[in-house]
Image (tube, grey):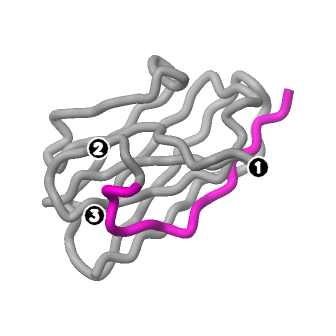
Amino acid sequence: QVQLVESGGGLVQAGGSLRLSCAASGRTISGNGMGWFRQAPGKEREFVAAISRSGSSTYYADSVKGRFTISRDNAKNTVYLEMNSLKPEDTAIYYCAARRTPMWTTSAAQYDYWGQGTQVTVSS
């Protein structure tokens, strides 16, 4: 079993930056594909970014491409989401998720473990 805990969310002005962390416990996630998703009020959960177990393969939603960067430190059992040039429409609860397999996917249904989420609010 894997437990995921997100941190690093908060309130930031448009154009600002935040770095989210997702710390895993229970067992190593070095063999797991990992993803970040977000859910804004009244909207469905949407894919943000994903990374393969080695970090050699990443994928981003078009809405965040060029502004967000996903990375991982398997030695620390942690995945990160660096968010730059934030916009009010990035406001959401951000969730970290892990798969049992090494590769990423954009489908939330194919992730097996989820964190509780961290709130990101971007003011205009």
Q: Disc 3 and disc 1: Cα gap in Å?
A: 30 Å
Task: Label 1, secondary structure: give it.
Answer: loop
Looking at the picture, which amino acid does disc 2 mark? Thr
Give above or below for 115 relative to 106. below
Residue at 39% from the left image edge and 59% from the top image edge:
97
Q: Mark 3 points at which residue?
A: 77
Residue 105 circle label: 2
Question: Could you classify mark 3 by the number of other residues whose Cα lies within 10 Å: few (under 14), some (14-19), or many (20 or more)?
Answer: some
Quadrant location of the N terminus? bottom left
Q: What stretch is highlighted in magenta?
A: 109-124
> For residue 105, what is the image quadrant?
top left
Residue at 44% from the left image edge and 47% from the top image edge:
36
Give above or below for 92 relative to 99. above
Q: Name the residue under label 1.
A: 41
Q: Which of 71 and 97 is in front in this view?
A: 97
Q: Nearer the viewer, residue 81 or 110?
A: 110
Question: Could you classify mark 2 by the number of other residues whose Cα lies within 10 Å: few (under 14), some (14-19), or many (20 or more)?
Answer: many
Q: Residue 34 at x, y = what percent?
A: 31, 52
Looking at the picture, which amino acid does disc 3 mark? Asn
Q: Which of marks 3 and 2 is nearer the N terminus?
A: 3
Quadrant location of the C terminus? top right
Task: Label 2, secondary structure: give it.
Answer: loop
